[in-house]
Image (cartoon, rainbow, N blue to C red):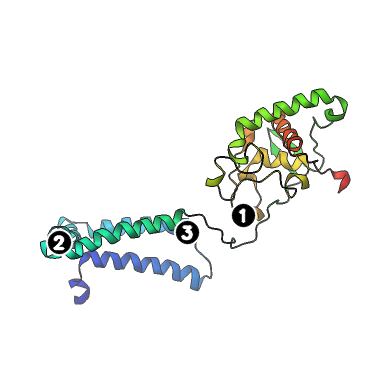
Amino acid sequence: MPKKLKNMPRLLQAVLAVAGIYLGFVLVFDVILGQVIPASLLTMYMFFVVAGVFMVYTFTEESARALTAPIRALVEDPSKKTIRNIVFVLVPLLAGAYTYNKMSPSFEAPVELRSIHPAPPSSVMVFGKRYDLLKLVNPYRKVEKEDPEKFKTLVAEGAAIYIQNCHSCHGGKLDGRGPYAVGLNPVPLNFQDVGTIAQLQESYLFWRIATGGPGLPKEATPWISSMPVWQDFLTEDEIWKVILFLYDYTGQRPRSWEHE
């Protein structure tokens, strides 16, 4: 080890080692490979790097004492009172600023274009069965003309299911402003908007509700939907009834293949 490096405080050595590895990751991915390393992946790598460096620099009692010596001096040495007070003020402020920056909502456009209504697959496997989405229709839609009173009952049942399971995110008025909506990114859809369910077939809604966020195709990224996989919690009939309620409450009509 070079003499200058050997005489350098071990705490500074450890900090420089971590910083060097971090810059190495960024250099390799951004400059050499031309790829942006995901922040979550970089955080995971750096966690193991910091843990590894810490273990190396605290391998013996002597090295552990050498590593913590500057910290002990800062806390215990009366002559360092001014520096200590400055550090004790700056560290919480920096930690608070970092936390605020990470937690504050961002309205920047995503790196890639995202399709709000990605094209559904031609078929989907849900409830242990395969459905042809090109031919799938709401089995209760015909009741609207055949038995209006029964249809109202089905809509009311769908409303009860919606209130119990969906209104926390999509809102009591179906406007995407439920009590949990502010904590979601992207925010839940506003079903009152003519650009949402009014433009979709009921089979599309069935697919999206049943498979949730994990069922989205690649073009729906990089934003990840918070929609649960509702086939794990609702029955097929319950999903169809909720769909009836969505259209009935908003006064919209679902698109049909005949009108395409």
Q: Which of these two is toward me, 110 or 30?
A: 110
Determine which quarter of the picture holds residue 178: top right
Secondary structure under badge 3? helix
How many angstroms separate mark 3 from mark 1 (CA)? Answer: 16 Å
Q: How crowded is mark 1: few (under 14 residues within 10 Å), some or many (20 or more)?
A: some
Q: Name the residue under label 1.
A: 221
Residue at image position (59%, 61%) is 109
Which label sits on residue 73?
Answer: 2
Residue 59 point in image, percent of width and height: 21, 56
255 shown above or below 223: above
Residues marked 1 and 2 touching at CB (< 8 Å): no
> Which amino acid is tagged 2?
Ala
- Is residue 234 left or right of 142 when viewed as pictured? left
CA separation, marks 3 and 2? Answer: 35 Å
Local SS, label 2: helix
Q: Which of 161 and 233 is in front in this view?
A: 161
Q: Which amino acid does label 1 sit on?
A: Thr
The residue positioned 65% from the left and 29% from the top of the image is: 161
Residue 101 seen in the figure: yes
Q: Name the residue under label 3.
A: 39
Q: Nearer the viewer, mark 1 or mark 2?
A: 2
